[in-house]
């Protein structure tokens, strides 16, 4: 990638998002949505700090400003983390999975590579490329590809999971600001909360889409990640419900 997505101007980013390019996609959009929510939390705190009317909440708002800034930066990093994770998944799915995917002049080298990775593949003997050797090669290629897809899918699920966790932390900050910050910006707190909630629920789709590939290799990990995502959404639902009463 020649330029980080988070460094693009708004017009260029949206043009890329709406194009046929593989990235950015839904995961990046979820991260950006939450980053805007965290930025709004910062804005509300900034418009409260230094106001005599809210002196009793001065230190609280300073702490929230500091925490929200860290979260905003992490969430903007999430825009590119999603793109990188998607690239790894794409490369894994693009790996050779059958004998026909190997260049003829690379068969011997491929056999040696597979043997070096612990697979049982016979050397090409006087009988040439037998059906048995082809089957051995295809089995090894398939196992390698499945392992690579599972590994890449873990990273592709962890990226939006981090967005969910950061967004939940920022949502807690937004809720804390209500009644303890500049009352003229209360509507911005609600907008921040909605952006953060949208980021959480949107990122959850990107977690869930990777779980089937993870589950085939590690059912326990897939179950744990599913429960983490579900727990974050449940907590966010409770916070948002209390906030908008």
Image: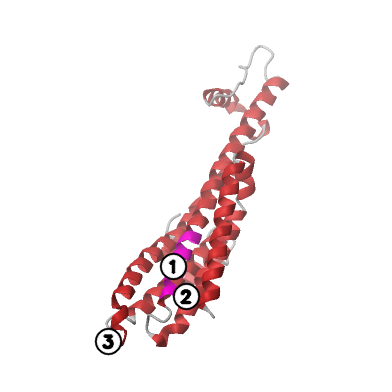
- Give the mark nearer the N terminus: 3 vs 1: 3
Q: Can you say whether 57 is above or below 78 in the image?
A: below
Q: CA distance from mark 3 to mark 2?
A: 24 Å
Q: Quadrant of residue 173?
A: bottom left
Crowding around mark 2 (Cα neighbors within 10 Å: few <14, some 14 to 19, many 20+) is many
Secondary structure of the residue carrying numbered label 3: helix
Q: Can you say whether 123 is above or below 73 in the image?
A: above
Residue occupying the point 55% across, 22% down: 115
- Give the mark nearer the N terminus: 2 vs 1: 1
Query: Is 9 one of the magenta-colored residues?
Result: no
> What x and y, as percent, mark residue 60?
32, 73
Q: CA distance from mark 3 to mark 1?
A: 25 Å
Q: CA distance from mark 2 to mark 1?
A: 9 Å
Q: Can you say whether 119 is above or below 16 in the image?
A: above
Q: Nearer the viewer, mark 3 or mark 2?
A: 3
Indicate left or right for 79 with 136 as reference: left
> What x and y, as percent, mark residue 122?
62, 17
Residue occupying the point 63% across, 17% down: 124
Magenta stretch, residue numbers:
163-176
Look at mark 1 in the image and give the residue it sits on.
170
The residue lying toward the viewer, choosing from 25 and 73, is 73
Indicate left or right for 48 with 83 as reference: left
* Quadrant the C terminus occupies: bottom right
Mark carried by residue 192: 2
Query: Is 175 one of the magenta-colored residues?
Result: yes
């Amino acid at each position: 990638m020649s330029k980080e997505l988070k460094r693009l101007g708004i017009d260029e980013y949206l043009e890329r998002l709406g194009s046929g390019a593989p990235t950015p996609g839904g995961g990046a959009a979820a991260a950006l949505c939450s980053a805007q929510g965290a930025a709004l939390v910062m804005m509300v705190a900034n418009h409260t700090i230094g106001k005599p009317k809210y002196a009793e909440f001065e230190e609280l708002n300073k702490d929230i400003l500091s925490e929200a800034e860290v979260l905003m930066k992490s969430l903007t990093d999430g825009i590119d983390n999603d793109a990188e994770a998607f690239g790894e998944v794409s490369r894994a799915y693009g790996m050779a999975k059958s004998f026909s995917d190997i260049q003829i002049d690379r068969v011997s080298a491929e056999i040696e590579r597979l043997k070096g990775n612990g697979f049982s593949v016979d050397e090409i003997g006087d009988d040439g490329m037998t059906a048995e050797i082809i089957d051995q090669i295809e089995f090894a290629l398939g196992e390698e590809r499945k392992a690579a897809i599972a590994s890449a899918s873990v990273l592709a699920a962890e990226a939006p999971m981090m967005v969910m966790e950061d967004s939940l932390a920022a949502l807690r900050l937004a809720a804390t600001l209500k009644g303890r910050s500049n009352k003229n910006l209360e509507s911005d707190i609600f907008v921040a909360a909605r952006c953060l909630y949208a980021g959480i629920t949107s990122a959850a789709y990107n977690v869930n889409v990777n779980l089937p590939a993870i589950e085939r290799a590690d059912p326990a990990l897939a179950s744990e990640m599913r429960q983490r995502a579900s727990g974050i959404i449940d907590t966010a639902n409770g916070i948002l419900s209390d906030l908008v009463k």
